[in-house]
Amino acid sequence: MKLYNKILFLTILQLVAIFIFGIYQIQSLYLTQKTAFDQKNLIQSEMIQKRFEEKLDVLQKTAQILINSQEVITGIISNDTDMLYNWSKLFLSPSTDKIHFIDLDGTVISRGELEFRFADDVSKRFYVQQALHNDTFLGIDMVDGEECLVYAKRVKQYGQKTIGIISVALIIDDAFLASLVEGTTMGIAYHSQNQTLSTTKEQKLTNASSLHVMLQAGSIKEAGFNIGFTSEEELNALKEARTNLFVGIGLALIALVLALHFTLLKHLKEYKALSQVLIDFYEDRLDIKEVMSTIKQSTTEQTTPEVKKIAEALFNMSQKVADTQNVLEHLSSTDQLTSLSNRRRLEESLEQKLKESKREESFFSVIMIDIDRFKTINDTYGHEIGDHVLIHTAHLMRESIRESDILGRWGGEEFLLILPHTSLEGALVIAEEIRLKIYHCTFEHYPQRVTMSLGVSTYRISDTPNSILRRADNALYRAKNNGRNRVEYEN
Amino acid sequence: MLLRLVVFSFFIFASLHAKEYIFATYPSNTPSKIIQALTPLMEYLSAQSSDTFKLVVTKDYDELTKRIEEKSIDFAWVNTKNFVLLKEKIPSLQYLVTYLEHSKNGQITPYYQSFIIAMKDANITSLEEAKNKHFAFTDKESTSGYAYPMMIFEAHHINPYTFFQKVFFLKKHDKVIEALINHSIEVGAISDGTYYNALEKYGDRFTILATSEPIPLDAIVASENVSHQESKRIAHLLENIPLNSPAIKAFEEHLGWSSAGFVRKNERFYETFKRTLKVPLYETLQ
């Protein structure tokens, strides 16, 4: 597996693990919050239930307090409207909207909420009839044209004789409903055959359930209270937060993977370029100098410091390899004794010149040189002197030739001189100059005169290395046969 | 020299005989208002009689009665009912004067009246037509709101508790008017002053079904402490109180009474009230 894939895979693996852990944590938090939310709603439902029961309790207690008052009993017996009004108005409150005193005929003696409205007949009202027949009534009924929670009870003199009725009522209106759900996040709705009220004006209650109220059946049909959530905003906000976190983590994961991908690409690209140079070098697509130039080109200002250091190291290493290669190449193409090109090098040069001449339609000449009677020098004065003659002769010849000319030791006491862009005539001049220079030279450790025979040949279009060398060699042979110490040229 | 001696002797004599009288009343209104309303009268009497009149507001009517019996007060301002009851209880009680008032109908009278009224839109033109209607008194303790209306019913041989469908008690005269206006009741008993105020406030929307006999206004009485001659002297001073005096103005200012001074009537003037005490109570408490 590639390094890129490995890094990417391992990183994604870690990120996915973090992502899964994050999702687990968020989901756990969501469930905890959801449980708390449900618990809160349950508590709120119970609170609303309790408030409703308290409202009923207030109605009953208010009625009971007034019933126990001797002044109220006296007021009912004597139709003392004013006294009953003064008593009942003290008990009016947000939980008690109406207090009525009614005689046994169903005539209102006094209203706590309306001082000057009394004497009307309410005997046909359901709650009045129920209280007269059953002693008490606790339920929903119409009181003065308004739907109310009503508690009606007989008023008894000395606890025995019924003298009238007291009715304590709370109007079922928006304010009443609002007071039940005040401070909660829940809503309440009241529905009857006459009206529909709700604390949530336009929205429907969600997860609505009936309020458990212990009321007697009244004259109002289908009356009931429902409580529910005004909206699921809180829960929705929770869900939305969860979704946002999921999406956020997901996007972060994608962004991280992309960032990682591009970072890896950027860094690995530099490493890859360097390694490709090495691979190309190994597979002979590049030589060492090309390797060096490629490395040099691949390092720019944007290159990371780590890659720069590696590139420098590789460059230096290549430099050393190149130097070593040069030394080896020099050694492999140089004659150790005379420091001239050796025969292999001469053959390569000759071949190259033939190619150049064919390609460029140029010309060149070669001179085959042989030291006369060199065996005698060796035999007479020893190999050490012989080597000295060879070294010194080579030195003298090198001094006599041009920079572009190629001089090498062909073998033993034979030398080959390749003269680029030189005609036969020019080659003959050069050959004569060399012959004379050697002839007139005095050797330090060899007292005899040294002479050499030279055979000259020049390039022909159909030449091969062997053919041109053969002609030069033939010329040399003739020079030997014609008395040595002379220059001969091809026929 | 002799004249000087006579004047000096008279001064000494007068100083020796100058008295301090206790003038009491009960709290028919806020005590502070009563004190403010009656203090100028005390000053007037003190100045005119050369005696000192000290005002006392008792805790209630019972205390006033008790103190008259104990002779710890000399003069008292009492209402009609109090006067009649006190006179029956303390025969030695001396009547001095009756309070006079500018009536709403423009007359100056020592009395007022009780009306039985109905709303005009109820189409009731006589007491007999009010049968089985809803009726309201003010209070059983009220003279014009209960006692005299009961005399009217007695005269018409009517037991209101059976004649009317329902009889209510509304405490105050104004509340009877409001109950009529709100059509809670069709018929009610009120004082003439309340009626005239209602006329101003609501216009001519009421029918007077019956009118009571004159109800004497409040009286000023003297206890046994005060000599007959002295009581006459004080009564005379009260009768002659100027209508522009601070004492008269104080009634208007602090109690809203349109006072016209005092007049000395015959004690029999209060006899009519005695008859109210004989009217059947038609006890409703069972």
Image: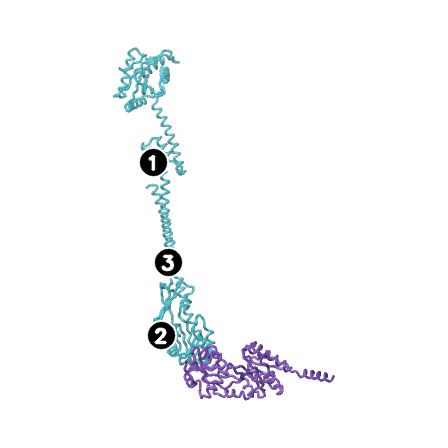
Chain colours: A cyan, B purple
Q: Which residue is mark 2?
A: A219
Disc on res. A276 = 1
Q: Earlier in the sequence, mark 1 or mark 3?
A: 3
Quadrant in which the C terminus of chain A appears: top left
Q: Residue furthest left?
A: A462
CA gap, disc 3 and disc 2: 41 Å
**Three-letter amino acid code of the residue under disc 2:** Ser
Q: Residues within 10 Å of mark 1 (few under 14, many from 20)?
A: few
Between tags 2 and 1, which lies in front?
2
Q: Amino acid at mark 3?
A: Asn
Q: Is residue B253 found left or right of A299 in the rendered image?
A: right
Circle 3 residue: A236
Between disc 3 and disc 2, whose residue precedes?
2
Task: Please indicate, yes or no, whether residue A210 appears anywhere in the rendered image.
Answer: yes
Taking the image as drawn, is residue A223 in sight?
no
Pick whichever, B233 or B63, lies toward us. B233
Q: Is residue B262 above or below residue A353?
A: below
Rendering quarter of residue B38:
bottom right
Q: What residue is drawn where x is 37% and y is 60%?
A: A232
Is A20 displayed left or right of B143 in the figure? left
Q: Secondary structure at mark 3?
A: helix
Q: Position of residue A84 (x, y in %)?
A: 46, 77
Report whether A55 appears left or right of B254: left
Q: Rounded to the nearest whole Å, what is the CA distance between mark 2 and mark 1?
A: 97 Å
